[in-house]
Amino acid sequence: MSGHTVSSMLVREAIDRSFAPSVEALDALRIADASDPVTVHHARTSVRRLRSNIRALDGHVEPVPTLRGELGWIAECLGRVRDADVLNVRIAGRVDGLPEPLQLGCTAIQAVLADERVTADEHLRSAVASPRFRDLVDELDLLVKEASSSDGALDVRDVVRAPWRAMRDAVRRLDDPPSDEQLHDLRIETKRARYAAELFTSVSGARGGRFLRRATSLQDALGAQHDAARACEWFLGHGGEDTGLARACGWFAAEAAAERDDLREAWRPAWASLREPKARFW
């Protein structure tokens, strides 16, 4: 580190710090309980980090052309399980204190979610047991081994500036008020910038830590809004003909919609903090 600017680091250091643990978390699905919520969450986060960093390190690592697409495939499998878990936690935290008719409806919602979770879990287990998943992990292992032997250097500006500018441009494209889709796109760009910055945590010092904390705050604020929007969509689509289920879904949809709208501008203070020049370490 020279002055306040990180210049470069070796490719293999970034691979050892980011790629290797992510591949291990994904491979853990084969030996751990693939339905465990914590295992699923860690694997899903690792897949996102891998896809993002393969993109960020374009030209420095050379994956097979289909690798990002295969990561997208397993991410979708993991996402179905994770979505059911998130919704179940949301409902469980709101049941107490509801009128009895709504509590009965909550039981019906939880039964629907349980069925969806079982289906998603079976789909994930089948995917993890398949030759396709084994080939994916093997390709990732090979990528890590080849990149870990590299003596090439990464320039922080080349790696971090592109996702940073994409995040900034996503903010500039927002309507007033921003749509749920636009905020979700901004959340994706924020993750990419954060993951790229994480590659340099061993050399970026306190300034790098500050950037990561502020990027995480922005991501969390956008994530809360996205979760509320997704929950609203789910409840609106699952009323059915059962009166108790329909009543409870309507109540939860209205609550989620109010939360979604209240959070539509809640990310702005985090962005104002992140966009300050002193938050950047490059």
Image (cartoon, rainbow, N blue to C red):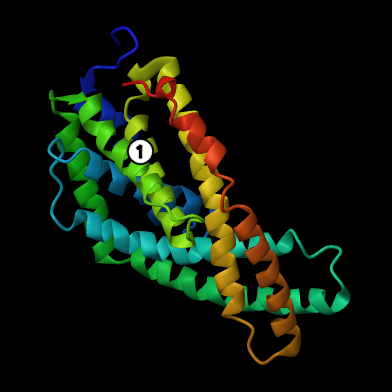
**Where is residue 204, by image quadrant?**
top left
- Look at the picture and state if 209 lies above or below 226: above
Q: Can residue 153 be seen in this view?
A: yes
Q: Residue at x 52, y 63 (%)?
A: 83
In the rendered structure, the answer to whether residue 165 lies left or right of residue 191 reads: left
Dividing the picture into quadrants, the one containing residue 164 is: top left
Can you say which quadrant of the picture contains the N terminus?
Answer: top left
Percent coordinates x, y for residue 125 in the rendering:
42, 66
Numbered-mark total: 1
Question: Which quadrant would residue 53 be assigned to in this image?
Answer: top left
Which SS class for mark 1?
A: helix
Q: Identify residue type, mark 1.
A: Ala
Residue at left 40%, top 45%? 171
Find disc 1 in the rendering and name its residue: 193
Residue furthest out toward the top: 3
Say if 218 sits above or below 34 in the image: above
Picture coordinates of residue 201 (x, y %)?
37, 24
Q: Residue furthest front?
A: 176
